[in-house]
């Protein structure tokens, strides 16, 4: 059994955080949807390095899933997650129910333009509205000094940086590097959906991104490098590529078609059977 203290209401969460901050201690928030792995736990470690106390939130946010997506099937095991968080040095779990987060009459949403357009925003039209709204709520409920998000979901990280700046939220956003299996596959809760055969194909996604990033860094044209990466992903056995795009590192503007000379990122989402995998690499 875990000894991790758990609160389920924003009032209890605020009381705990207020007591720490009144004592002059810093607080880090790590938002998650559970089904935790080493990627999430690395964010807890970053929180610990930046604050005296780490709060993890566990909320499978219904508004960021479309009706066709895996909200009902999303893996849920709070007891296991709480044990992993306690072992990683987390001090408090905030696990609100849907009615605490979205009480009857809830009518407000946060929309972030530009940076949320294209890529995940095109493939999942309501996704970033759901993410931006719930993250804004988590940041105002917990009122942390810092909040830690993974570079694994790079477009999401940039959307969150944008909204905290635009809404003047007094929090520092820290991006944590992507944790990977030894063969390069980015750790993800959705990797659990892969068959053994699909799992063997999956590392091709990161190999293709790395090759694309290296080619563009050496001066190759963006359009040809993107096309070669998509071809390599499909040749490895992926069923389809939703997008694979080289974008500017901060505002995620489309770059190319020729060579580029600025900080950039190559981002992709591709499908292996029914599973959709995301990854990105810096250029
Ligand atoms: P999720 O529970 O999938 O919504 O993810 C919660 C947080 O963990 C987000 O900030 C993700 O970007 C981050 N995350 C997910 N996978 C990884 C990974 N492999 N490495 C680092 N962070 C990750």
Image (cartoon, helix red, strand yellow):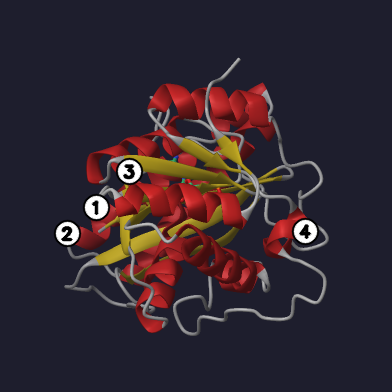
Q: Nearer the viewer, mark 3 or mark 1?
A: 3
**Residue carrying label 2:** 218
Query: Residue 185: image x %, image y %?
Result: 46, 35
Q: Nearer the viewer, mark 1 or mark 4?
A: 4
| Mark 4 lies within 8 Å of ligand 1 (Cβ measured) | no
Q: Are marks 2 and 1 in contact (CB under 8 Å)?
A: yes
For numbered disc 4, what is the local secondary structure?
helix
* Mark 2 to mark 1 CA distance (whole Å): 6 Å
Q: Nearer the viewer, mark 3 or mark 2?
A: 3
Q: Are marks 3 and 1 in contact (CB under 8 Å)?
A: no
Could you tell me which residue is drawn at 65 percent across and 46 percent down? 8
For numbered disc 2, what is the local secondary structure?
loop
Q: Are marks 1 and 4 in contact (CB under 8 Å)?
A: no
**Residue carrying label 3:** 47
Among the two numbered marks 2 and 4 on one chain, the one whose residue lies closer to the N terminus: 4
Q: What mark, if any, has residue 214 been given in the picture?
A: 1
Among the two numbered marks 3 and 1 on one chain, the one whose residue lies closer to the N terminus: 3
Q: Is residue 183 above or below residue 138?
A: above
Q: Residue furthest top?
A: 1
Q: Nearer the viewer, mark 3 or mark 4?
A: 4
**Residue carrying label 4:** 99
Within 10 Å of disc 2 (Cα), the crowding (few <14, some 14-19, many 20+) is few
Residue 107 visible, this angle: yes
């Amino acid at each position: 059994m875990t000894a991790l203290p758990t609160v389920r209401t924003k009032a209890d969460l605020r009381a705990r955080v207020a007591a720490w901050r009144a004592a002059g201690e810093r607080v880090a928030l790590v938002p998650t949807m559970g089904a935790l792995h080493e990627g999430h736990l690395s964010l807890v470690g970053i929180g610990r390095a930046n604050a005296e106390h780490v709060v993890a939130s566990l909320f499978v946010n219904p508004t960021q899933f479309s009706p066709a997506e895996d909200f009902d099937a999303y893996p849920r095991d709070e007891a296991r997650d709480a044990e992993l968080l306690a072992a990683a040095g987390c001090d408090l779990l905030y696990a609100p129910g849907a009615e605490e987060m979205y009480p009857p009459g809830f009518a407000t949403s946060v929309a972030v333009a530009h940076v949320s357009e294209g890529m995940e925003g095109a493939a999942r039209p309501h996704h970033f509205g759901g993410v931006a709204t719930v993250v804004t709520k988590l940041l105002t409920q917990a009122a942390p000094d810092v909040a830690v998000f993974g570079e694994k979901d790079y477009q999401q990280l940039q959307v969150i940086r944008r909204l905290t700046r635009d809404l003047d939220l007094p929090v520092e956003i820290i991006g944590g590097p992507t944790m990977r299996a030894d063969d390069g596959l980015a750790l993800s809760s959705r990797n659990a959906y892969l068959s053994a055969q699909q799992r063997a194909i999956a590392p091709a996604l990161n190999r293709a991104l790395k090759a694309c990033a290296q080619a563009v860094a050496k001066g190759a044209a963006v359009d040809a490098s993107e096309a070669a990466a998509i071809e390599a992903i499909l040749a490895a056995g992926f069923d389809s590529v939703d997008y694979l795009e080289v974008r500017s590192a901060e505002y995620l503007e489309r770059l190319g078609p020729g060579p580029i000379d600025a900080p950039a990122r190559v981002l992709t989402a591709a499908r292996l059977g029914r599973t959709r995998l995301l990854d990105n690499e810096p250029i």
